[in-house]
Amino acid sequence: MRFLLLAALVACTQPRSPRCKQVCAREYECVISTKADMPFDEKECIAACAVLEQDQDNLAKVQKHADCVNKQQACSAVLECQ
């Protein structure tokens, strides 16, 4: 619980990267268009992504996820990216 609070506080002060905005917008578009039964908040996605992107231990994971989302054409495939 403390981690989530800390992440939320840090997210409020983190810059919003173009990569995070693009990836989260695409994921949001896919959640809406497929009517996926999953909670998704685009702003929370961008904030969490920005926090992870600033952490050198997680930067490679962010890049890998962004690469996956960017290369997929079908929304079902986008939503399977990890």
Image (cartoon, rainbow, N blue to C red):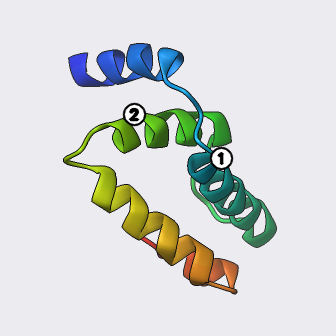
Q: Position of residue 28 (x, y in %)?
A: 70, 55
**4 and 62: which is toward the camera:** 62
User: Which residue corresponds to mark 2?
Assistant: 51
Q: Is residue 64 left or right of residue 20?
A: left
Q: Residue at left 59%, top 33%?
A: 16
User: Which residue corresponds to mark 1?
Assistant: 21
Specify the amino acid type for callout 1: Lys
Q: Secondary structure at mark 1?
A: helix
Question: Is residue 53 shown above or below 5?
Answer: below
Q: Which mark is residue 36?
A: none
Q: Secondary structure at mark 2?
A: helix
Q: Quadrant of the C terminus?
A: bottom left
Q: Position of residue 61 (x, y in %)?
A: 31, 60
Residue with the most extreme left position: 57
Q: Residue at left 35%, top 24%?
A: 7
Pick whichever of labels 1 and 2 is earlier in the sequence: 1
Q: Residues within 10 Å of mark 2 (few under 14, many from 20)?
A: many
Q: Is residue 8 left or right of residue 26?
A: left
Q: Position of residue 80 (x, y in %)?
A: 48, 76
Q: Residue at left 46%, top 23%?
A: 11
Q: Quadrant of the N terminus?
A: top left
Task: Decide if residue 79 is in sight here.
Answer: no
Task: Decide if residue 8 is in sight here.
Answer: yes
Question: Is residue 42 shown above or below 82?
Answer: above
Decide: marks 1, 2 in contact (CB < 8 A)? no
Q: Residue at left 46%, top 73%?
A: 81
Q: Measure the alpha-carbon separation of dots 1 and 2.
A: 13 Å
**34 and 70: which is toward the camera:** 70
Specify the amino acid type for callout 2: Val
Q: Position of residue 58 (x, y in %)?
A: 26, 49
Question: Is residue 11 shown above or below 29?
Answer: above
